[in-house]
Image: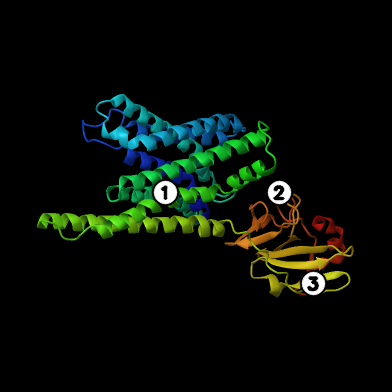
Amino acid sequence: MLEQFVTVLPGTLAPALLVMVFSVLLGIGEGRDRPRSSSWRLIGLGVGVLGALVFALLRATVIINRRTMVNYPTLVACVLTDLAAIAVVLAADRLVSDWHRHPWVMDLANALAALAIALTTFRALPDVILQLTAFVEPGEPVLTSAMLLRALGFLLGLAAAVTVAAILRTMHTSCPRIAFRLAALLMVVLLLVRHIVALVALMQTTGLVLLHGWAFRVMALGYNADLTLVLAQVLVFIIPVLACLVAGWRMPVTGASTAEDRSHRAFRRRALASAVWSLVAMIGITLALTVGTAQAHKVPVLSPPERYSLTADTATIRFSQVEDGHLHRFSYRAKDGTEMRFIIIRKNGAAYGVGLDACDNCGDAGYYEKDGKIICKKCDVAINLATIGFKGGCNPVPLPYKTGRGAILISTADLDALSSHFKS
């Protein structure tokens, strides 16, 4: 669940924030007294979502196996529309203040905003949508508690992004407009930086540009810091948070009349509430994208090897030591000096899975146990318990063994013969 949550959340934050920002800066009029283009931004969001769904479907079915042919032109378009979006943010106040005289200018601003929303959504959502294909692990039944938890993580990530954008939006009625516009400007600039870095990295990969020295280091730093840039897009709204706090505290609780008193108190409550909730949302996003991401991507540590009886020709492991149905790891130094590991797990009844802590595909990365499953540390594939002890796929390299005298008996000659699996 956590893995789906921390993948979906950063992928949906940028579109959610962009929609929110333009709804505030370009939102004007009610009913018939609204620009004819006021719905274009929502249409842009719909087009972006639909395009992302189609692209994700084509990728999932391997109809498109070279994403460069799509990513390159869309990234170029994203950079250009981001620049146009920055211009719209800077001119927003003048656009909405006198839009009746020049409605076509407002239409142009909404069209540019809709295009920016559509392209940003198209760029951000395919990887989010492809998380849907990870709900069911290979070999698992469709309806399991694990699948439901993954689905819940997906939905929570989507809901968190929308909720955060909605909470941040509440500040526009309480803080000075310039403070909100400055935060919006910084958010769009950071989005531009992300798109430029992704474009340059793609051009470097395909050989269209060849960066060296400091230029390559800057590009690599920006590429590796994408999650930090996503977080920064949220944290720039600390500017209107502070402005709301100042406006709320400075508002006098008494006025010239009772009605004005109530108005002042209501404004103060609204300003402080929106600031506090926005701050809570930012703290939550920060924890999710730092602590949550680190926890979800934590590299598993292999359990330490257990002790067992070893003679010149036989390794002996008592049944009582491995009969609990959990993974047990053992180490062995081969005659050629190689440090080896092998694993034993009771499968059912008197059947045991015995093999090297290595496979033909992933080498000696090893296996670990999580939620009752045996998982390859390198490729994260869950191994079918019944197939441990047999060749194929990512299964542990089978290790011959015998049973007798209440123990599993493994010949040291068989271990020595397989030492090459642990040589780098």
Q: Mark 1 = which residue?
A: 161
Q: Position of residue 166 (x, y in %)?
A: 34, 48
Residue with the mark numbered 2: 393
Amino acid, disc 2: Gly
Reading the chain from its start, which is encountered first: label 2 or label 3? 3
> Is 293 on the left-hand or right-hand side of 172?
right
Residue at 21% from the left image edge and 34% from the top image edge: 31
At a point 17% along the width and 54% down the height, the residue shown is 263
Q: Where 322 sits versus 71, above or below?
A: below
Q: Quadrant of residue 212?
A: top right
Alpha carbon distance from label 2 to label 3: 28 Å
- Could you tell me residue 20's position as x and y percent? 36, 43
Q: Which residue is mark 3?
A: 316
- Helix or strand or loop: what does disc 3 sit on? strand
Foreground residue, 84 or 35? 84
Camera-near label (2 vs 3) is: 2
Identify the amino acid type marked 3: Thr
Comparing labels 1 and 3, the label whose residue is closer to the camera: 1
Considering the numbered disc 1 on the image, is that residue within a helix, a strand or a loop?
A: helix
Mark 1 or mark 3: which comes first in sequence? 1
Which is nearer the eye, 198 or 259?
Answer: 259
Give amino acid for label 1: Ala
Q: Residues within 10 Å of mark 1 (few under 14, many from 20)?
A: many
The Cα atoms of the two marked residues, 1 and 3, are separated by 55 Å
